[in-house]
Image (cartoon, grey):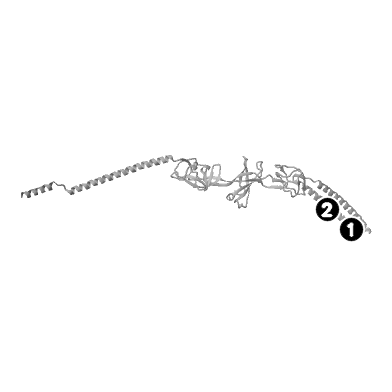
Protein backbone atom coordinates (compact mmCIF):
# COMPACT_ATOMS: atom_id res chain seq x y z
CA UNK A 1 0.00 0.00 0.00
CA UNK A 2 2.86 2.30 0.64
CA UNK A 3 4.03 1.68 -2.85
CA UNK A 4 0.79 2.82 -4.30
CA UNK A 5 0.82 5.89 -2.18
CA UNK A 6 4.20 6.87 -3.41
CA UNK A 7 3.21 6.44 -6.97
CA UNK A 8 0.17 8.60 -6.52
CA UNK A 9 2.20 11.22 -4.70
CA UNK A 10 4.75 11.29 -7.51
CA UNK A 11 2.11 11.65 -10.14
CA UNK A 12 0.61 14.48 -8.21
CA UNK A 13 3.91 16.28 -7.97
CA UNK A 14 4.65 15.77 -11.65
CA UNK A 15 1.36 17.30 -12.66
CA UNK A 16 1.91 20.29 -10.47
CA UNK A 17 5.42 21.10 -11.83
CA UNK A 18 5.01 20.59 -15.74
CA UNK A 19 4.29 23.61 -18.42
CA UNK A 20 1.07 24.10 -20.36
CA UNK A 21 1.54 23.37 -24.15
CA UNK A 22 -1.39 25.57 -25.19
CA UNK A 23 -0.01 28.64 -23.49
CA UNK A 24 3.36 28.16 -25.12
CA UNK A 25 1.76 28.04 -28.70
CA UNK A 26 -0.20 31.20 -28.08
CA UNK A 27 2.97 32.98 -27.07
CA UNK A 28 4.69 31.85 -30.30
CA UNK A 29 1.88 33.19 -32.40
CA UNK A 30 2.02 36.55 -30.67
CA UNK A 31 5.74 36.72 -31.23
CA UNK A 32 5.43 35.99 -34.94
CA UNK A 33 2.68 38.62 -35.23
CA UNK A 34 4.94 41.21 -33.65
CA UNK A 35 7.68 40.31 -36.13
CA UNK A 36 5.32 40.73 -39.09
CA UNK A 37 4.06 44.07 -37.80
CA UNK A 38 7.60 45.33 -37.29
CA UNK A 39 8.58 44.11 -40.80
CA UNK A 40 5.57 45.83 -42.39
CA UNK A 41 6.37 49.09 -40.58
CA UNK A 42 9.97 48.85 -41.76
CA UNK A 43 8.86 48.22 -45.35
CA UNK A 44 6.54 51.21 -45.27
CA UNK A 45 9.34 53.37 -43.89
CA UNK A 46 11.74 52.16 -46.58
CA UNK A 47 9.21 52.80 -49.36
CA UNK A 48 8.55 56.31 -48.00
CA UNK A 49 12.27 57.00 -47.87
CA UNK A 50 12.71 55.74 -51.46
CA UNK A 51 9.91 57.97 -52.76
CA UNK A 52 11.32 60.92 -50.87
CA UNK A 53 14.79 60.38 -52.28
CA UNK A 54 13.46 59.71 -55.83
CA UNK A 55 11.30 62.84 -55.78
CA UNK A 56 14.23 65.00 -54.76
CA UNK A 57 16.40 63.48 -57.50
CA UNK A 58 13.72 64.15 -60.15
CA UNK A 59 13.36 67.76 -59.07
CA UNK A 60 17.08 68.25 -59.25
CA UNK A 61 17.20 66.59 -62.69
CA UNK A 62 14.36 68.75 -63.98
CA UNK A 63 16.02 71.86 -62.59
CA UNK A 64 19.30 70.89 -64.18
CA UNK A 65 17.58 70.18 -67.56
CA UNK A 66 15.73 73.49 -67.46
CA UNK A 67 18.94 75.33 -66.67
CA UNK A 68 20.58 73.79 -69.75
CA UNK A 69 17.68 74.71 -72.17
CA UNK A 70 18.75 77.18 -74.92
CA UNK A 71 17.48 80.74 -74.75
CA UNK A 72 15.65 81.89 -77.91
CA UNK A 73 14.16 85.25 -78.85
CA UNK A 74 10.48 85.06 -79.68
CA UNK A 75 7.85 87.56 -80.77
CA UNK A 76 4.08 87.61 -81.01
CA UNK A 77 3.69 89.29 -84.42
CA UNK A 78 0.00 90.10 -84.25
CA UNK A 79 -1.58 91.30 -87.50
CA UNK A 80 -0.55 94.46 -89.34
CA UNK A 81 -1.91 96.30 -92.36
CA UNK A 82 0.75 96.18 -95.07
CA UNK A 83 0.59 97.93 -98.40
CA UNK A 84 0.33 95.19 -100.98
CA UNK A 85 3.28 94.94 -103.34
CA UNK A 86 4.06 92.66 -106.24
CA UNK A 87 7.63 92.26 -107.40
CA UNK A 88 8.31 91.56 -111.04
CA UNK A 89 11.11 91.55 -113.56
CA UNK A 90 11.14 92.27 -117.26
CA UNK A 91 12.69 94.23 -120.08
CA UNK A 92 12.51 97.87 -121.10
CA UNK A 93 11.19 98.86 -124.52
CA UNK A 94 9.79 101.75 -126.48
CA UNK A 95 6.08 102.03 -125.87
CA UNK A 96 5.45 102.79 -129.53
CA UNK A 97 8.43 101.77 -131.63
CA UNK A 98 8.31 102.89 -135.26
CA UNK A 99 10.52 101.04 -137.80
CA UNK A 100 11.52 103.32 -140.67
CA UNK A 101 12.78 102.16 -144.09
CA UNK A 102 12.91 103.25 -147.70
CA UNK A 103 9.47 103.70 -149.24
CA UNK A 104 10.55 104.94 -152.70
CA UNK A 105 12.35 103.24 -155.52
CA UNK A 106 15.55 103.63 -153.53
CA UNK A 107 19.05 104.42 -154.58
CA UNK A 108 22.42 105.29 -153.11
CA UNK A 109 22.42 106.97 -149.70
CA UNK A 110 24.15 110.33 -149.93
CA UNK A 111 23.81 111.59 -146.36
CA UNK A 112 22.53 110.40 -142.98
CA UNK A 113 21.40 113.36 -140.89
CA UNK A 114 20.71 111.83 -137.44
CA UNK A 115 22.35 109.67 -134.82
CA UNK A 116 20.84 107.37 -132.16
CA UNK A 117 19.73 109.37 -129.15
CA UNK A 118 18.69 112.43 -131.14
CA UNK A 119 15.17 113.84 -131.19
CA UNK A 120 13.40 114.43 -134.52
CA UNK A 121 10.19 116.11 -135.63
CA UNK A 122 7.44 114.64 -137.76
CA UNK A 123 8.42 114.84 -141.44
CA UNK A 124 12.04 115.69 -140.73
CA UNK A 125 14.51 114.32 -143.31
CA UNK A 126 16.82 111.84 -141.61
CA UNK A 127 18.60 110.40 -144.69
CA UNK A 128 19.12 111.68 -148.26
CA UNK A 129 19.29 109.40 -151.32
CA UNK A 130 20.96 110.34 -154.60
CA UNK A 131 18.40 111.73 -157.08
CA UNK A 132 20.54 112.83 -160.05
CA UNK A 133 18.60 110.68 -162.52
CA UNK A 134 15.24 111.59 -161.06
CA UNK A 135 16.11 115.29 -161.28
CA UNK A 136 16.69 115.01 -165.03
CA UNK A 137 13.46 113.13 -165.44
CA UNK A 138 11.66 115.90 -163.60
CA UNK A 139 13.24 118.53 -165.85
CA UNK A 140 12.10 116.59 -168.94
CA UNK A 141 8.55 116.47 -167.68
CA UNK A 142 8.60 120.18 -166.99
CA UNK A 143 9.66 120.78 -170.61
CA UNK A 144 6.85 118.53 -171.85
CA UNK A 145 4.40 120.74 -170.02
CA UNK A 146 5.71 123.73 -171.98
CA UNK A 147 5.30 121.85 -175.28
CA UNK A 148 1.77 120.81 -174.38
CA UNK A 149 0.81 124.32 -173.37
CA UNK A 150 2.18 125.71 -176.68
CA UNK A 151 0.15 123.17 -178.64
CA UNK A 152 -2.89 124.09 -176.62
CA UNK A 153 -2.47 127.80 -177.36
CA UNK A 154 -2.16 127.10 -181.16
CA UNK A 155 -5.25 124.91 -181.09
CA UNK A 156 -7.22 127.60 -179.26
CA UNK A 157 -6.09 130.27 -181.75
CA UNK A 158 -7.11 128.13 -184.75
CA UNK A 159 -10.48 127.55 -183.17
CA UNK A 160 -11.01 131.28 -182.55
CA UNK A 161 -10.24 132.16 -186.19
CA UNK A 162 -12.54 129.44 -187.47
CA UNK A 163 -15.42 130.73 -185.37
CA UNK A 164 -15.04 134.19 -186.99
CA UNK A 165 -15.18 132.70 -190.49
CA UNK A 166 -17.98 130.25 -189.99
CA UNK A 167 -20.64 132.94 -190.34
CA UNK A 168 -19.21 134.04 -193.71
CA UNK A 169 -19.38 130.51 -195.04
CA UNK A 170 -15.66 130.05 -195.45
CA UNK A 171 -15.51 127.37 -192.71
CA UNK A 172 -17.94 124.55 -192.42
CA UNK A 173 -19.53 123.39 -189.22
CA UNK A 174 -17.52 120.20 -189.45
CA UNK A 175 -14.24 122.11 -189.52
CA UNK A 176 -15.24 123.99 -186.41
CA UNK A 177 -15.96 120.70 -184.62
CA UNK A 178 -12.58 119.30 -185.70
CA UNK A 179 -10.73 122.39 -184.47
CA UNK A 180 -12.64 122.28 -181.19
CA UNK A 181 -11.61 118.65 -180.68
CA UNK A 182 -8.00 119.54 -181.46
CA UNK A 183 -8.10 122.34 -178.86
CA UNK A 184 -9.59 120.02 -176.21
CA UNK A 185 -6.97 117.35 -176.91
CA UNK A 186 -4.16 119.89 -176.55
CA UNK A 187 -5.59 121.08 -173.22
CA UNK A 188 -5.81 117.47 -172.01
CA UNK A 189 -2.17 116.86 -172.92
CA UNK A 190 -1.24 119.87 -170.78
CA UNK A 191 -3.03 118.35 -167.81
CA UNK A 192 -1.38 114.97 -168.44
CA UNK A 193 2.06 116.57 -168.55
CA UNK A 194 1.41 118.42 -165.32
CA UNK A 195 0.21 115.23 -163.65
CA UNK A 196 3.33 113.38 -164.76
CA UNK A 197 5.50 116.14 -163.36
CA UNK A 198 3.66 116.04 -160.06
CA UNK A 199 4.09 112.26 -159.92
CA UNK A 200 7.80 112.59 -160.51
CA UNK A 201 8.09 115.25 -157.85
CA UNK A 202 6.30 112.98 -155.39
CA UNK A 203 8.62 110.09 -156.26
CA UNK A 204 11.62 112.35 -155.74
CA UNK A 205 10.32 113.41 -152.37
CA UNK A 206 9.94 109.77 -151.35
CA UNK A 207 13.58 109.20 -152.06
CA UNK A 208 14.38 111.04 -148.85
CA UNK A 209 13.84 109.04 -145.67
CA UNK A 210 11.80 111.08 -143.20
CA UNK A 211 10.57 110.60 -139.63
CA UNK A 212 6.90 109.54 -139.63
CA UNK A 213 6.34 111.19 -136.21
CA UNK A 214 8.22 113.11 -133.56
CA UNK A 215 10.34 110.95 -131.31
CA UNK A 216 13.71 109.64 -130.24
CA UNK A 217 16.07 107.86 -132.62
CA UNK A 218 16.82 104.47 -131.06
CA UNK A 219 18.71 102.71 -133.83
CA UNK A 220 20.41 103.51 -137.16
CA UNK A 221 21.46 100.74 -139.55
CA UNK A 222 22.32 102.73 -142.69
CA UNK A 223 25.51 104.49 -143.78
CA UNK A 224 26.37 106.87 -146.64
CA UNK A 225 27.11 105.02 -149.88
CA UNK A 226 24.76 102.19 -149.05
CA UNK A 227 22.23 101.30 -151.74
CA UNK A 228 18.72 100.95 -150.34
CA UNK A 229 15.31 100.10 -151.73
CA UNK A 230 11.89 99.13 -150.50
CA UNK A 231 13.19 95.66 -149.68
CA UNK A 232 16.16 96.83 -147.62
CA UNK A 233 14.34 96.40 -144.33
CA UNK A 234 14.47 98.68 -141.29
CA UNK A 235 16.99 101.53 -141.54
CA UNK A 236 15.95 103.46 -138.39
CA UNK A 237 13.95 102.76 -135.23
CA UNK A 238 12.18 105.64 -133.51
CA UNK A 239 10.43 105.75 -130.13
CA UNK A 240 7.32 107.82 -130.71
CA UNK A 241 7.39 110.88 -128.45
CA UNK A 242 10.20 109.18 -126.53
CA UNK A 243 7.70 107.13 -124.50
CA UNK A 244 9.11 104.04 -122.79
CA UNK A 245 7.63 101.05 -121.01
CA UNK A 246 8.56 97.99 -119.02
CA UNK A 247 7.25 94.58 -120.03
CA UNK A 248 6.79 93.01 -116.59
CA UNK A 249 6.30 89.25 -116.44
CA UNK A 250 3.75 88.17 -113.82
CA UNK A 251 2.07 84.95 -112.72
CA UNK A 252 -1.64 84.35 -113.14
CA UNK A 253 -2.27 85.10 -109.44
CA UNK A 254 -0.40 88.39 -109.58
CA UNK A 255 -2.12 89.47 -112.79
CA UNK A 256 -5.48 89.00 -111.08
CA UNK A 257 -4.44 91.42 -108.30
CA UNK A 258 -3.61 94.42 -110.51
CA UNK A 259 -5.48 96.76 -112.84
CA UNK A 260 -4.70 99.46 -115.36
CA UNK A 261 -3.75 102.78 -113.76
CA UNK A 262 -1.95 101.16 -110.83
CA UNK A 263 1.38 102.83 -110.09
CA UNK A 264 4.71 101.00 -110.10
CA UNK A 265 8.35 101.76 -109.32
CA UNK A 266 10.76 100.58 -112.01
CA UNK A 267 14.48 100.20 -111.34
CA UNK A 268 16.80 99.40 -114.26
CA UNK A 269 19.64 97.00 -113.54
CA UNK A 270 22.74 98.86 -112.45
CA UNK A 271 20.85 102.09 -111.81
CA UNK A 272 20.48 103.55 -108.30
CA UNK A 273 17.43 105.52 -109.42
CA UNK A 274 13.86 104.32 -109.69
CA UNK A 275 11.26 105.66 -112.12
CA UNK A 276 7.54 105.96 -111.44
CA UNK A 277 5.13 104.63 -114.04
CA UNK A 278 1.63 103.28 -114.45
CA UNK A 279 0.25 100.04 -115.81
CA UNK A 280 -1.47 100.92 -119.06
CA UNK A 281 -2.12 97.46 -120.46
CA UNK A 282 -2.48 93.95 -119.02
CA UNK A 283 -1.93 90.95 -121.24
CA UNK A 284 -5.23 89.32 -122.20
CA UNK A 285 -3.56 85.92 -122.65
CA UNK A 286 -1.35 83.65 -120.54
CA UNK A 287 1.66 81.80 -121.89
CA UNK A 288 0.66 78.11 -121.61
CA UNK A 289 4.29 77.05 -121.14
CA UNK A 290 5.26 79.14 -118.12
CA UNK A 291 1.79 80.28 -116.98
CA UNK A 292 2.80 83.94 -117.07
CA UNK A 293 1.43 87.11 -118.62
CA UNK A 294 2.72 90.61 -119.31
CA UNK A 295 1.87 93.87 -117.60
CA UNK A 296 2.99 96.90 -119.62
CA UNK A 297 4.14 99.78 -117.41
CA UNK A 298 4.21 103.16 -119.17
CA UNK A 299 7.20 105.38 -118.39
CA UNK A 300 8.13 108.90 -119.39
CA UNK A 301 11.40 109.39 -121.20
CA UNK A 302 14.54 109.44 -119.09
CA UNK A 303 18.18 108.90 -120.11
CA UNK A 304 18.44 106.00 -117.66
CA UNK A 305 15.72 104.04 -119.47
CA UNK A 306 17.33 102.12 -122.30
CA UNK A 307 15.18 99.82 -124.44
CA UNK A 308 16.34 96.24 -124.31
CA UNK A 309 17.68 96.59 -120.78
CA UNK A 310 16.61 94.47 -117.82
CA UNK A 311 14.68 96.01 -114.91
CA UNK A 312 12.75 95.14 -111.77
CA UNK A 313 9.43 96.61 -110.70
CA UNK A 314 7.43 96.94 -107.50
CA UNK A 315 3.72 97.23 -108.26
CA UNK A 316 1.18 98.54 -105.77
CA UNK A 317 -1.55 95.96 -105.21
CA UNK A 318 -3.73 97.25 -102.35
CA UNK A 319 -3.35 96.51 -98.64
CA UNK A 320 -3.27 93.17 -96.81
CA UNK A 321 -3.72 92.43 -93.09
CA UNK A 322 -1.40 89.64 -91.97
CA UNK A 323 1.38 88.77 -89.49
CA UNK A 324 4.70 90.41 -90.34
CA UNK A 325 7.96 88.61 -89.57
CA UNK A 326 11.62 89.36 -90.26
CA UNK A 327 13.38 87.29 -92.85
CA UNK A 328 15.47 85.51 -90.18
CA UNK A 329 12.34 83.92 -88.67
CA UNK A 330 11.23 82.21 -91.88
CA UNK A 331 13.04 79.05 -92.96
CA UNK A 332 12.49 76.82 -95.95
CA UNK A 333 13.20 73.30 -97.15
CA UNK A 334 11.86 70.90 -99.75
CA UNK A 335 8.41 71.06 -98.14
CA UNK A 336 8.22 74.85 -98.40
CA UNK A 337 8.46 77.73 -95.95
CA UNK A 338 8.02 77.25 -92.20
CA UNK A 339 8.64 78.84 -88.80
CA UNK A 340 9.33 77.50 -85.32
CA UNK A 341 6.86 78.44 -82.59
CA UNK A 342 7.12 77.93 -78.81
CA UNK A 343 4.10 76.34 -77.14
CA UNK A 344 2.77 76.87 -73.61
CA UNK A 345 5.04 74.08 -72.35
CA UNK A 346 8.06 75.89 -73.86
CA UNK A 347 8.52 73.14 -76.41
CA UNK A 348 9.38 73.91 -80.03
CA UNK A 349 6.93 73.04 -82.80
CA UNK A 350 7.20 73.50 -86.54
CA UNK A 351 4.50 75.43 -88.39
CA UNK A 352 4.29 75.45 -92.20
CA UNK A 353 3.45 78.88 -93.60
CA UNK A 354 2.88 80.66 -96.90
CA UNK A 355 4.62 83.98 -97.40
CA UNK A 356 3.34 87.02 -99.26
CA UNK A 357 4.51 90.58 -99.73
CA UNK A 358 8.14 91.42 -99.01
CA UNK A 359 8.57 94.89 -97.46
CA UNK A 360 11.34 96.84 -95.78
CA UNK A 361 9.83 95.87 -92.40
CA UNK A 362 9.67 92.15 -93.10
CA UNK A 363 7.72 89.45 -94.89
CA UNK A 364 3.97 88.96 -94.56
CA UNK A 365 2.65 85.50 -93.70
CA UNK A 366 -0.60 84.92 -95.55
CA UNK A 367 -1.26 81.37 -94.30
CA UNK A 368 -0.21 79.29 -91.30
CA UNK A 369 -0.21 81.89 -88.49
CA UNK A 370 -2.93 83.80 -86.67
CA UNK A 371 -0.49 86.30 -85.18
CA UNK A 372 -0.93 85.17 -81.55
CA UNK A 373 1.83 82.53 -81.63
CA UNK A 374 5.27 82.93 -80.07
CA UNK A 375 7.57 82.71 -83.08
CA UNK A 376 11.31 82.16 -82.80
CA UNK A 377 13.01 85.12 -84.43
CA UNK A 378 16.52 83.74 -84.71
CA UNK A 379 18.45 80.50 -84.22
CA UNK A 380 15.59 78.63 -85.80
CA UNK A 381 18.07 76.40 -87.61
CA UNK A 382 19.67 75.38 -84.27
CA UNK A 383 16.55 74.06 -82.56
CA UNK A 384 14.45 71.04 -83.32
CA UNK A 385 10.83 70.04 -82.95
CA UNK A 386 9.97 68.94 -79.39
CA UNK A 387 13.00 70.61 -77.82
CA UNK A 388 12.50 72.57 -74.59
CA UNK A 389 13.71 76.16 -74.77
CA UNK A 390 13.74 79.33 -72.70
CA UNK A 391 11.72 81.92 -74.66
CA UNK A 392 12.71 85.55 -74.29
CA UNK A 393 10.23 88.09 -75.60
CA UNK A 394 11.62 90.47 -78.24
CA UNK A 395 10.28 93.73 -79.63
CA UNK A 396 7.26 93.08 -81.92
CA UNK A 397 7.79 93.69 -85.62
CA UNK A 398 5.98 96.37 -87.60
First in residue order: circle 1 vs circle 2: 1
Q: Nearer the viewer, residue 356 or 174?
A: 356
* Image x and y of residue 74, in percent: 48, 42
Say which residue appears at 80% left-offset and 49% top-offset. 200
Tell me: residue 29, above or below residue 272.
below
Regarding residue 369, the answer to whether it shows in the image is no
Mark linked to residue 178: 1
* Label 1 vs label 2, nearer the camera: 2
Percent position of residue 75, x then y:
49, 42
What is the secondary structure assignment of the residue under circle 1? helix
Looking at the image, residue 131 sits to the left or right of residue 5; the answer is: right
In this view, the residue in front, 152 or 397, is: 397
Res 192 label:
2
| In this rendering, position of residue 330 left or right of residue 282 | left
Element under label 2?
helix
Spot occupied by residue 392 in the image (x, y as percentages of width and height): 46, 40
What is the crowding at mark 1: few (fewer than 14 residues within 10 Å), some, or many (at least 20)? few
Residue 102: assigned label:
none
User: Which residue is farthest left?
Assistant: 1
Looking at the image, is 391 positioned above or below residue 286?
A: above
Q: Nearer the viewer, residue 181 or 304?
A: 304
Amino acid sequence: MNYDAKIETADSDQKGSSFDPLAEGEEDRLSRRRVWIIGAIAAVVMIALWFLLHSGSSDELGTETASQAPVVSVVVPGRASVAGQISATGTLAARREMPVGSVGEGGRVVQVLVEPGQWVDAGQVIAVIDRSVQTQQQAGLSAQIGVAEADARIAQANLDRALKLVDRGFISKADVDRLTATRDAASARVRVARAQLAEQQALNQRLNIVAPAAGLILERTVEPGQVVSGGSGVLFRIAKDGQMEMLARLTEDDLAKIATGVSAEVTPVGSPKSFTGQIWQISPVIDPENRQGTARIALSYAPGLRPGGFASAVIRAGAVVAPLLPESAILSDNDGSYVYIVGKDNKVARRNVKTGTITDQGITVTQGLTGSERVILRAGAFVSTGETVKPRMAQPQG
